[in-house]
Amino acid sequence: MSKHVNWSGVFPAVTTQFNPDFSIDYEGTHKVISGLVRDGVSGLVICGTVGENTSLSTEEKISLVEVAKDAAAGRVPVISGVAEFTSANASKVAKEIQRVGADGIMLMPALVYSSKPFETAAHFRSVAASIDLPVMVYNNPPIYKNDVTPDILISLADCDNVVCFKDSSGDTRRFIDVRNEVGDRFVLFAGLDDVVLESIAVGAVGWVSGMSNAFPKEGETLFRLARDGRFKEAMPIYEWFMPLLHLDARPDLVQCIKLCEELMGRGTALTRPPRLGLLDHERNEVEALVKAALANRPTLPDVGL
């Protein structure tokens, strides 16, 4: 492969910022990314679920990679999501992402079509073979309907550049099942915010995080404490964080996370249709959670940030 990624730490699933007319605010997105890198995150995932990938054109996705690379300035890896209807289109987008300098891709199953297990595996295999970049396999069955089971992942062990598995199923047993079959063949990443500590305890070495967009220092600190076995120090932060982390498991997670980001002065809550803003009672609920969190914001232990 042409690139190496240090698959470790917190990689926020970066939001895409929009102007009032729903065009992309590239300057605002650059500012958001720069702030995350400044505050110590270990990597970036752009054009993922939280980045509203499926609401973006191919040209916009490529431009966002270029913005992220410029903002990261080589300090952290930039991984770009690939989510397309067909394997051929996914390969085409992945090649363009490679061309403009991404450090890797996060590949979703083919969208809309409910594939059989061998078809899901074939999709990942064909897209990975079309590029010279490391690939993170992204499993999120509640959102994308196709479940990348341990058996499917294990069947990809011969694909050299399929290197990482991000699981958002919430079932942390899968990490153990994979490791029991193929050892350390795949780097394991937590993909659901409210099971991150459990995921790290059973072998995850990274975390693609939604809520770390709003609270990057807390997210990276929590991760490093758990990684280093400092669970006694990590637990109070996890308990404080949990009401907000639960937002990552809601169907409207993008709206919730972007609102938290706005409340923290890090971005705007505007999403591109078909995603619409939260209803008043939902917005009030999220605002109350952030207010409570700020009223009891913990003092963070030293983890080297």
Image (spheres, rainbow, N blue to C red):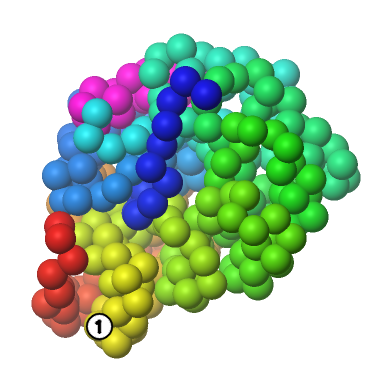
Secondary structure mostly seen in the magenta stretch: helix
Quick check: can you spot residue 86?
no
Q: Which one is in front, 263 or 104? A: 104
Q: Residue 107 at what x, y percent from top left?
A: 60, 36
- What amino acid type should be assigned to the residue bearing mark 1? Glu
Q: Is residue 128 above or below residue 188?
A: above
Question: Seen in the image, is 198 located left or right of residue 83?
Answer: left
Residue plotted at (60% across, 32% down) = 161
Q: Residue 58 at what x, y percent from top left?
A: 52, 18
Q: Is residue 145 above or below residue 110?
A: below
Residue plotted at (39% across, 18% down) = 101
Q: Quadrant of residue 230?
A: bottom left
Q: Secondary structure at mark 1?
A: helix
Q: Is residue 115 above or below residue 249?
A: above
263 in the magenta segment: no
**Which residue in the protein does label 1 denote?**
233
Question: Seen in the image, is 177 located left or right of residue 95?
Answer: right
Question: Seen in the image, is 11 located left or right of residue 40?
Answer: right
69 in the magenta segment: yes
Q: Residue 137 at what x, y percent from top left?
A: 61, 43
Q: Which residues are magenta?
A: 53-73
Residue plotted at (56% across, 15% down) = 95
